[in-house]
Image (cartoon, coloured by chain):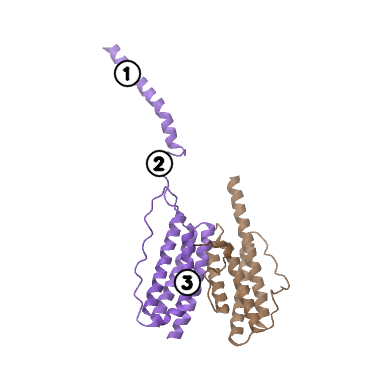
Chain colours: A purple, B brown
Amino acid sequence: MTERLAATRALSRRRVLAVSTMMLPLAATASCSVPDLLRPPPGLSASVRTLRASITAEQALIGTYQHVIAAHPALAAMLRPFLAQHEDHLAQLKSRLIIPPHVTVPPLPAPSAAAAPAGSARAALSLLEGAERAAATSQLERLSTATPTQAQLYASIAASEATHAVALAALSQEAG
Amino acid sequence: MPGGARRTAAAGSADVAALQGVLAAENAAVYGYGLAGAHLSGGQLSVAQQDWTLHRAASATISAMITRRGAAPAAAPVAYRPPFRVSSAATAVALTVILEDGLVTAYLGLVALEYRSLRTFGAQQMQAAAIRAAGWRGSTTAFPGLPASALRSAG
């Protein structure tokens, strides 16, 4: 009885050692930085997410201009140059958006309904001025997660938006 | 770590190089606004004088930023050759546009650096210079500071 117990214990020790030896390479593989073939591919980088956010914001700004122009046709001639520059911004931003083939992302959200343009031309111009200032501020917040070339594009677009805001403020004064 | 130290030194060197570029553009603006102001009057002269003061202050600020990084600010040349003969209010205004556009481009160099606060500072100064340029030009542009070669054809 005592001999059987000793043999069983010895067998258990051998099994534990054997299993430990087999597990060692697996444990080592799991703990080091060797790429794991079973791990899903990485998702969107921070810079791509930032670019998508910038595209969405630009689409919303264009939507606001279109709403204001539709509501105030008399402002169309003075606002179209700004709108055209925003369309150029959007085209440049979109041209830089490359989604890796292995990544599935939801489509860019449709532009949300812009705020209803205020009644007077002056109020509508003030609405656009505020939207331009907010857009320029948001572009600066994107700089930290952007690649150097993206950061330069955001900064240039922000500078353009800042000039729009000043021009719109002057037009708003004239309209009042 | 030697690698980390090399990267830090390289980043610091890039910071100083970009700041020296900005300083050169600010010093050119100080000289250029003085030249332009001689041909301006009334409201335009007042604006030019304000801008000249701004650029002198900016030059001092940038010089201090370079000094803090352990480098010597490059001295401003005694005189500059303008890109065309400045002999009227129209040519004076055209010169201020060129000076401000040059500043937008110079500050754009800071935006590509790694240091986050320099990026933001550069972008803010780009906005200020772009607003002055648009004021002198009388119109806005879609991509202040970016050369055409940086823009992709978006079909």
Residue under the image location 66 percent in, 76 percent down: B32
Q: Nearer the viewer, mark 2 or mark 3?
A: 3
Q: Is residue B10 visible?
A: yes
Q: Secondary structure at mark 1?
A: helix
As drawn, the label of residue A9 is 1
Q: CA distance from mark 1 to mark 2?
A: 39 Å
- Residue B63 placed where, x, y %? 64, 66
Q: CA distance from mark 3 to mark 1?
A: 83 Å
Q: Amino acid at mark 1?
A: Arg
- Residue A89 placed where, x, y %? 48, 66
Chain under numbered label 2: A
Chain under numbered label 1: A
Q: CA distance from mark 2 to mark 3?
A: 45 Å
* Image position of A69 with respect to B122: above or below: below
- Residue B69 placed where, x, y %? 62, 59
Please identify the quarter of the rendering in which residue B16 is found. Answer: bottom right
Q: Nearer the viewer, mark 1 or mark 2?
A: 2
Lateral position of residue A61 relative to residue B38, left or right = left
**Mark positioned earlier in the residue sequence (3 or 1):** 1
The residue singled out by tag 2 in the image is A39
Lateral position of residue B119 relative to residue A126, left or right = right
Lateral position of residue B34 relative to residue A87, left or right = right
Residue under the image location 34 percent in, 75 percent down: A116
Q: Secondary structure at mark 3?
A: helix
Outermost residue on the right side: it is B78
* Image position of A121 with respect to A97: above or below: below
The residue singled out by tag 3 in the image is A84
Q: Is residue A136 visible?
A: no
